[in-house]
Image (spheres, grey):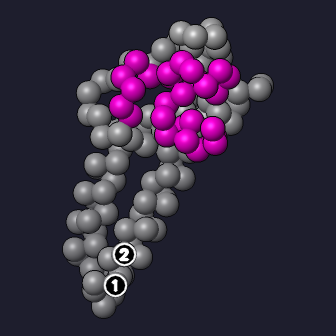
């Protein structure tokens, strides 16, 4: 199973069987989603120390930048200028809708990046 597929299916980086979040749906889930402290299958500890997920903010920032670039590129096909009010409205909408997804995926990516440390 590829790493990207494991990240997008909320799988444990150690055993590929357990889930990181209690709710298996990490896409557009606007409820408070509880994250497990360790894997139910292998016992792999997800949060290594207090403040471990501060680095996930940088991953979330990178995801936001990618989403902004994609939205601006798509919006530039519909309008003559990049600085159009409708593109700004689309940017705000995309970032608001993707915020919950970005929070979850950035934490999962951070766990995968530092799983061996």
Examine the image and state in which quarter residue 39 appears. top right
Q: Can you tell which mark lies on residue 74?
A: 2
Task: Tell me if 117 is positioned left or right of 62 in this view.
Answer: right
Residue 60 in view here: yes
Q: Nearer the viewer, residue 42 or 93?
A: 42
Q: To which residue does mark 1 refer?
A: 77
Mark 2 and mark 1 in contact? Answer it, CB < 8 Å: yes
Q: Residue at x 25, y 57 (%)?
A: 93
The local crowd at label 2, few if under 14, some if 14 to 19, many if 20 or more residues have their Cα within 10 Å, is few
What is the x, y in percent for residue 76? 35, 82
Q: Secondary structure at mark 2?
A: helix
Residue at screen point 70% across, 27% down: 115
Majority secondary structure of the magenta segment? loop
Which region is colored magenta?
1-26
* Position in image of residue 65 (x %, y %): 48, 59
Secondary structure type for disc 1? helix
- Is residue 50 at least partly visible in the picture? no
In the picture, the quarter occupied by the C terminus is: top right
Magenta stretch holds residue 56: no
């Amino acid at each position: 199973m590829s790493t990207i597929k494991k990240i997008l299916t909320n799988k444990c980086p150690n055993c590929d069987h357990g889930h990181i979040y209690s709710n298996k749906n990490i896409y557009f889930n606007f409820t408070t989603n509880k994250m497990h402290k360790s894997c139910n299958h292998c016992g792999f500890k997800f949060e290594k120390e207090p403040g471990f997920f501060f680095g996930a903010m940088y991953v979330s920032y990178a995801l936001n930048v990618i989403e902004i670039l994609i939205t601006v590129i798509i919006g530039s096909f519909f309008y003559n200028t990049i600085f159009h009010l409708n593109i700004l409205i689309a940017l705000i909408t995309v970032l608001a809708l993707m915020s919950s997804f970005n929070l979850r995926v950035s934490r999962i990516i951070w766990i995968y990046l530092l799983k061996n440390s």
